[in-house]
Image (cartoon, grey):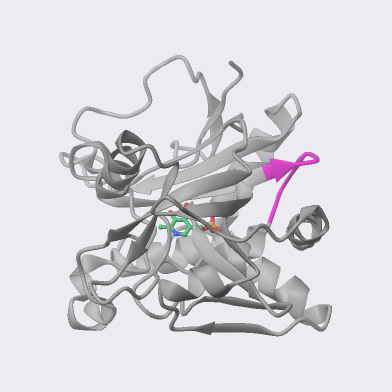
Amino acid sequence: MSLILVDVLAPGGPRPADPEAPLLHADDLGAVRGDGVFETLLVRDGRACNLARHEARFRASAAMLRLPEPDMGLWRRARELALAAWPGGEAAMRWVYSRGRESTGRPTGYILISPAPPRRTRVRVLLAERGFSLDAGARAPWALIGAKTLSYAANMAALRHAREQGHDDVLFTTAGGELLEGPTSTLVLVRDGALATPDPGEGILPGTTQAALFAEAAAAGIDCAAGRLHAAELHAADSAWLVSSVRIAARITAVDGMALPDPGEAAERDFRRLCDRALAR
Ligand code: PLP
């Protein structure tokens, strides 16, 4: 499998690294505590998609963790090196920025490009309580809700739990049944031709794909709104989607084993086209 690795914070500036050789030290706080942030971008047609939104979230996540402000000039150079080395085809580009070695305090940063995994375009989801309330972010900023941190073990555990029960993915909810997000995706509903998503301000990660999609849709005259959504609304929607950078859009076909209405081929194609156009900007 082709992998491209660039060490962003190497002394003297970004430089390509051997993806088959170790890069991290054993005391890297990203590895031993998940203390760091990351982004995953889609590489399509030789370019990184939705770049400005990923850069903005990367910087915001780093600020929430009080990491040294990332030097975006270095990250840009590293990205260009990585893209120039990529042989082609759709890929996932990860930016990883950790607090670095416990023993030196120097942050670690690298960019990794790997082939995009096969896409699942339809998913059956399990509703799963997230375990903290919608306003937890305000009351407990140390919960780092809204930052894309390296601590994804709980999200992966939720996915494993769903798969063990025969579902494909998870949709997190509050204890009261309000819809939040997937472990690696944002929920978007289509209702009467308009788009709706859970309010990114309330206990979820602001999704870059959803933001690009809403910008594209609004420019095309489609109503878009972020607000509180309840689980019951999934069944009333024309269609429901999990969107994220590399997978792009997976239509939810069932919730807790109950089928959702099928919007039909044309509606499904229109939604995917809108996503593709949004990412092509
Ligand atoms: N929510 C969570 C928790 C995520 O991990 C992700 C992406 O991995 C998303 C939403 C979707 O974000 P994006 O569209 O920026 O990939």
Which stretch is magenta? 43-49
Q: Locate residue 91, reporting x and y percent.
A: 65, 35
Along the line of sight, the residue nearer the viewer: 110 or 221:
221
Q: Is residue 274 visible?
A: yes
* Vertical comparison of 176 with 81: above or below: below
Along the line of sight, the residue nearer the viewer: 177 or 186:
177
Residue 47 falls inside the magenta stretch = yes
Residue 278 location, quadrant: bottom right
Residue 63 located left or right of residue 227 = left
Q: Quadrant of the C terminus?
A: bottom right
Residue 73 falls inside the magenta stretch = no
* Vertical comparison of 16 with 222: above or below: above
Q: Locate residue 103, reporting x and y percent.
A: 15, 39
Along the line of sight, the residue nearer the viewer: 126 or 81:
126
Q: Locate residue 83, reporting x and y percent.
A: 69, 36
Q: Is residue 38 visible?
A: no
Residue 118 location, quadrant: top right
Residue 133 located left or right of residue 211 = left
